[in-house]
Amino acid sequence: MDGLINRLMRNANHDVMENCTDAQDVRKYILQLPSWSDAVRASPNEFLRSALFRPSNRKVKRTYLKDEEIAIIGDGEIRYTGEELRQDDEPVWLQLLHLCRGKPIGAPVEFRPASLLRAVRRCNGRNPSSRDYKWLSDTITRFTATAVVISSQRLITKLGVSMVRRFVFLDDDGNRLHRWRVWIEPEMVNLFGGIYYSQIEWEMRLSLPSGLCTWLFGFLSTHRNPYPVKVDTIMRAVSNYDLESENAMRNFRRDLYNALNELVAVGFLSSFTIDKSGLIHIQRRQT
């Protein structure tokens, strides 16, 4: 544990660490995720500003990526190894983090799979089916077989983590357990320091169509007052369109316009415009 403490101290946000004088202080400040309300979920900004969770077509087979550079808007670099993650995986990841908040580092999170399925609106009011349980176990298993390497100005060294360290959902006879257990990587707390993570309105996130709309929702949640951004910057960031195709650009503009209109309709944005130069000007609704 002392080795882990030292690694976390080296990478932790300096604003958080400046008052820490010993390992006990470190435990108090960084050896658990921060607390947030039940109305929101939270994620590191690097994840929300990148194509880690791609808005890909569900009908297209997932690809396997090996040490692939993931597009990101702003500071930082992400390299990813594992099966492609998509926007419909993200609510499960957010809910797992939500269950982890406030718990001691390295402690397993235990939950009923039916409760998690309902939390991410997989069941839509009905009882979960065997297909739902398989979908959930496949999703979490996918998280365990990942390697995410992150570097940015705020991290002293590169940080390499798996999305989930360990997952137990079957007994010794191969039968599904009534309560599942998940362990999140302890180093994940490094990504939640200071202002470097964002809170997401959960009910609004679940109400949106999964894909470009939910990706934009996550990205724009990291900016209280979004700065103007070019259409092709967003297009490159989502890594889901042929950048050399004029037809793809037209399709993306149509999808982008529809997604932004959806965000206005649900009350997340108050307005947006796209000028002749392709610059998107966005106003978030202030609450």
Image (spheres, rainbow, N blue to C red):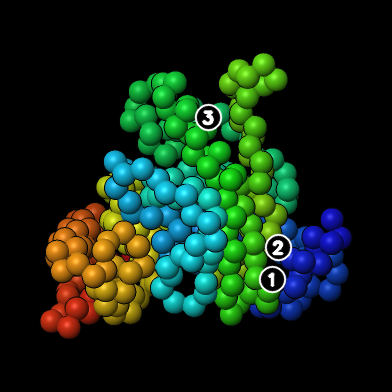
In primary-sequence order, the first of circles 1 and 3 is: 1
For label 2, the residue is 30
Indicate the quadrant where residue 234 lies: bottom left
Q: Residues within 10 Å of mark 1 (few under 14, many from 20)?
A: many
In primary-sequence order, the first of circles 1 and 2 is: 1
Q: Amino acid at mark 2?
A: Ile
Residue 236 located left or right of residue 64: left
Indicate the quadrant where residue 72 lies: bottom left
In primary-sequence order, the first of circles 3 and 2 is: 2
For label 3, the residue is 113
Q: Residue at position x 76%, y 76% from top?
A: 19
Q: In this picture, is 36 found above or below 144?
A: below
For label 1, the residue is 12
Q: Is residue 221 visible?
A: no
Outermost bottom residue: 277
Q: Amino acid at mark 3?
A: Pro
Q: Amino acid at mark 1?
A: Ala
- Residues under labels 1 and 3: Cα distance? 33 Å
Question: How many marks can you see?
Answer: 3
Residue 144 located left or right of residue 71: right
Which of pointers 3 and 2 indicates the residue nearer the eye? 3
Circles 1 and 2: CB distance less than 8 Å? yes
* Residue 18, position as x, y percentages in the image: 74, 78
* Residue 104, position as x, y percentages in the image: 73, 49
